Image (cartoon, rainbow, N blue to C red):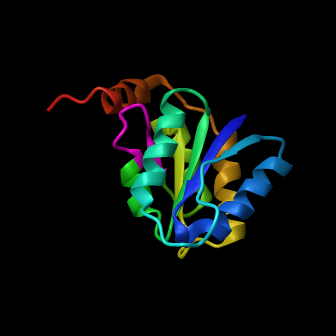
Amino acid sequence: MRIAIASDHAAVDLKATLREYLIEQGHEVADLGPETADRVDYPDYGYRLASVVAEGTAQFGVALCGSGIGISIAVNRDPACRCALVSEPLSAALAREHNDANVIAMGARLTGEDMAKACLDAFLSAEFGGGRHAGRVEKLSNPVF
């Protein structure tokens, strides 16, 4: 799979760990930055990640910041992205199975490396269930207010 990964400064170390983990698993990984722990704004990297996933350059995305909250909000601004903030494997799997999530978000200050890897494994191995969930997912990309 082709997976894009991006973070803010608070999650640079976790991003590097997960990038290498994904490569070891045989995935092609596009690291969208940042490269250092110098202060950056998470929306810039969330928008960049959303763009890559929305245009189909990457099949899935991994969004990381201190809590995972801010960058997940940024990614979800793009209607083609369904970014789920997760903290354990069950929510990661359900994000794919029920919501057809194409981006997973985690918080580097809240999720350890081993748990983050377990979340990634659950997310990437799950498949969208379709059926009763399909209409709901369609509404996520085409909201009516």
- Residue 145 screen position, x and y as percent: 14, 33
Residue 84, given in percent of the width and then of the height, sits at 46, 50
Q: Is residue 91 visible?
A: no
Kindly identify the residue that appears in the image at 78 percent across and 40 percent down: 27
In the displayed image of the protein, which residue is found farthest to the bottom?
109
Rendering coords of residue 119 (x, y %):
64, 56
Q: How many marks?
A: 0
- Residue 131 visible in the displayed image: yes
Instruction: From the viewer's perspective, tell me whether residue 68 is left or right of residue 116.
Output: left
Residue 128 occupies quadrant: top right
Whether 81 is among the magenta residues is yes
Q: Magenta segment range? A: 75-84
Q: Is residue 76 magenta?
A: yes
In the displayed structure, would residue 28 be above or below residue 11?
above
- Judge left or right: residue 93 versus residue 27: left
Q: Is residue 79 left or right of residue 102?
A: left
Identified at 72% across, 43% down, the residue is 29
Q: Nearer the viewer, residue 98 or 22?
A: 22
- Tell me the quarter of the picture where residue 78 sits: top left
Could you tell me which quadrant the N terminus lies in?
top right
Image location (x, y in percent) of residue 2:
70, 35
Q: Nearer the viewer, residue 42 or 110?
A: 42
Question: Quick check: 114 above or below 118?
Answer: below
Q: Nearer the viewer, residue 88 or 12?
A: 12
Is 44 rendered above or below residue 102?
Answer: below
Q: Main secondary structure of the magenta part?
A: loop
**Residue lying farthest left?**
145
